[in-house]
Amino acid sequence: MNKRRTTCAGVSVLVVAGVTGALAQTASGPTQPATSSEPAALAEILVTAEKRSERLADVPLSITAQNAEELTKVGVHDVSDLEKVVPGFAFTQSVYGAPIYTIRGIGFYGEAVGISPTVSVYVDQVPIPFTRAAEGVSLDLERVEVLKGPQGTLFGQNSTGGAINYIAAKPTDVLAAGAQASYGRFNDAAVEGFISGPISSTLSGRIAVRTEQRDAWQYSSYTGRTLGTKNFTAGRALLDWKPFDGFMYELNFNGWKDKSDSQANQFERYDSSSSPNTAYPGSIAFPNIAATLLARAPTQANDRAANWDTEQPEKRDDDFYQISGRGDFTLPAGLTLSSITSYSQLIVHSPTDTDGTELPIFWLRIDAFTKTFAQELRVSSPAEGRLRWMLGGNYQYDRVSDIQYAQNQGSNSGVGPLRFIEFDNDASGQHIRTSAAFGSLDWRITDTLTAQTSARYTHQTHDLTGCLRDVGGELATAFGLLSTVISGDPHVPAPGDPAYIPPGGCATLDDVTNYPTTVHKTLDEHNISWRAGLSWKPDTDSLVYGNVTRGFKGGSFETLPAIRPDQFDPVPQEQVTAYEIGARSRLFAGKIDLSGAAFYYDYKDKQLLAYISADFFGSLPGLVSVPKSRATGAEADITIRPISDWYFTLGGTYVATKVESNFATLGPLASSGSVDVQGAAFPNTPKLNFIADTEYRFPLWANWQGFVGGNVTYRGRTVSTFAARSEFDIPDYTLLDARAGMQHSDGKLRIWLWGKNVTDRYYWTHVDHVLDTVTRVTGMPATFGISASWRL
């Protein structure tokens, strides 16, 4: 059964929260397997996108909702897989391994761990503050919902691209259990299971665990070694306590551990022209490295082929845990008081070889941790009546330590005659405090016409302490000498000299004195985001709506090798004013669901990926703030069931982006120079995205049904960065998945064969230039396997 429901409405400022599942499902029960092929788009679905339970057909927001069965069937196991079921959603992996999510072409490419994304992720209204913490959110779900457009008026995180909310399957009032196992190419094995039920008359619980193990899928044509093993485990424990009528408290313990290999990049060519030290013919370990790399051919057009430094580890050691509690208390007059409290911690120990070769040119390891405390308190009116309102506030505190340890033996690994190999990009002292007050008001003017409005005031302070830090003493010696030279007193500094840098000390040089210093920066911002809209329901299953939204994304600090303090200067908050009109309807007695929308985003200070100068380290990827830009587009989604045992869905998004102001930025190579990108489209923003899914069911024998289906994803052409040559293009590509199997009529047992990227399409999602080489991040090759699921 296809459970897809895409409703394209006005640009929302709300984050999806707490989906209750299908109308026939109880609020306390998990999503049950279906026994027919009718898509969920043709059924009644309840959502709480506005923090209250409503029919999806009545919500004037742009939402894509999928239940657990549909996600499993199509092969959605993490956030990146949402490309298969959400029109306009795209995933990109950065050169350092960071996940980048975009909706309608609006995303945020940043390598720093402690940067808030443009697409926020939540689990049961609890924020996952940073994208690297979102790996385990797909465990044991009832549903996932995706909102498109600016978010933030009712939730604790502002985001200009959209929001994804995962709704965990809840504890049940009766004993329930289930399991799923799969095995595929590269010995890819995954096992997931849950058990749920009552503990006492007032307490119920649910425990779920998933583990994924896989052998290597990449290989080196130079060394014969392999890379790409997977070792990931996630778990969740839920407790629901209902001591008396009118009060309920939900406690959530969850976490994951990832000890998988990092992905290696593919080498395209050698180019050290962006380094200021090009006269240096090679590196310390490889004096003829330039000649060696100039003679090297690009990596073959094979998604499995790559090279990496065999002397360095490539295995991650990342983990995340979170505890959250939500209480709902019924007050007099039907009011509801809700409190959501959460604490989370993320640890990242993630190595990556960015140069795409087996030579030790540039190797980087991210050592970071984040600690987040969040508290929300709100009061809401009864759902009935012509006026519905909500008032609340929230507070979030983030402590971030973000250190990038680098080993550099490339063309810029030195100052004059002095060479260095190791250094830290140290942004270990970050404190982010966010306070907000919000409210919403819905007025049902007539039985068919409703006005909606909401607003949120946000104040955020972001304090940073950091520097370019020595590791091992070589950088300290080189930059200590540099300090004496540019300060006008060239000599070798000794302890006590203001230019002296002790081993492990900061090597960032003050703009005025030219002596080493630790950098302290503060970003203090506030904003008012809001939404206003009208919706009209000509009948029960139709809706027409329009919204105007003002949204913001907070400013950010980058993590770079900062020679000067101003290289730590943040990019300011971005602002978008979004206009959207949309409609949805159910036609021909439920055989067709059709929805569509058109939107226009007017941006100020859009945060985008470009290249910025890092002095002795050349030009490096970094964030820039584009004064004025826009995005214009439309999307549509249709679900058709011509007969009871066959459905077909198709969704697509068109987005045209443009820089509208004069803006000069560096290209990735020295030959690019400084270029005015006025008129250019946003990087990593394809104009066209399409998805399609179909499944046909047929009787086999007795109580068994067979099924066969497939999924197609198309992503249009785009570019990796501004002012780049054609080698930084990302061509369009189409991916085809297939599935076939059988299921018992009661839906409790299902067995199927599956294939992903069955045509073995070679494609890449990003191209980068870090120091001396141009490299690609490729997609996965064809994979195939068998899966089985069972429920009590």
Image: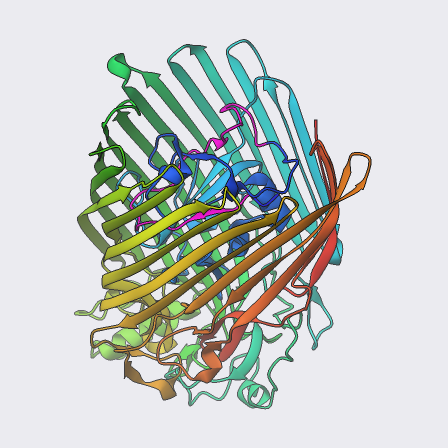
Horizontal side of 17 relative to 649 (left or right) equals left
Q: Is 8 a magenta residue?
A: yes
The residue lying at 44 percent from left, 59 percent from top is 88
Horizontal side of 375 relative to 765 (left or right) equals left
Horizontal side of 443 relative to 422 (left or right) equals left
| Quadrant (top left, top right, bottom left, bottom right) of the N terminus | top right
**For residue 566, above or below residue 12:** below
Instruction: Please tell me which residue lies in front, 702 or 494.
Output: 702
User: Which residues, given as a range, are shown in magenta?
Assistant: 3-31
Estimate the x, y position of residue 678 in percent, counting from the top left.
25, 78
Estimate the x, y position of residue 582 in percent, counting from the top left.
33, 52
Instruction: Please tell me which residue lies in front, 149 or 420.
Output: 149
Estimate the x, y position of residue 792 in percent, counting from the top left.
70, 26
Estimate the x, y position of residue 369 in percent, counting from the top left.
43, 47
**For residue 552, above or below residue 220:** above
The residue lying at 37 percent from left, 66 percent from top is 655
Horizontal side of 12 relative to 704 (left or right) equals left
The residue lying at 65 percent from left, 68 percent from top is 310
Instruction: Please tell me which residue lies in front, 132 or 274.
Output: 132
Q: Main secondary structure of the magenta part?
A: loop
Residue 565 position by quadrant: bottom left
Residue farthest toward the right in the current orientation of the protein = 701
Q: Is 718 a magenta residue?
A: no
How was this image coloured? rainbow
Residue 336 position by quadrant: top left
**For residue 523, above or below residue 341:** below
Visible in this render: residue 277? yes
The total number of labels drawn is 0
Visible in this render: residue 137? no
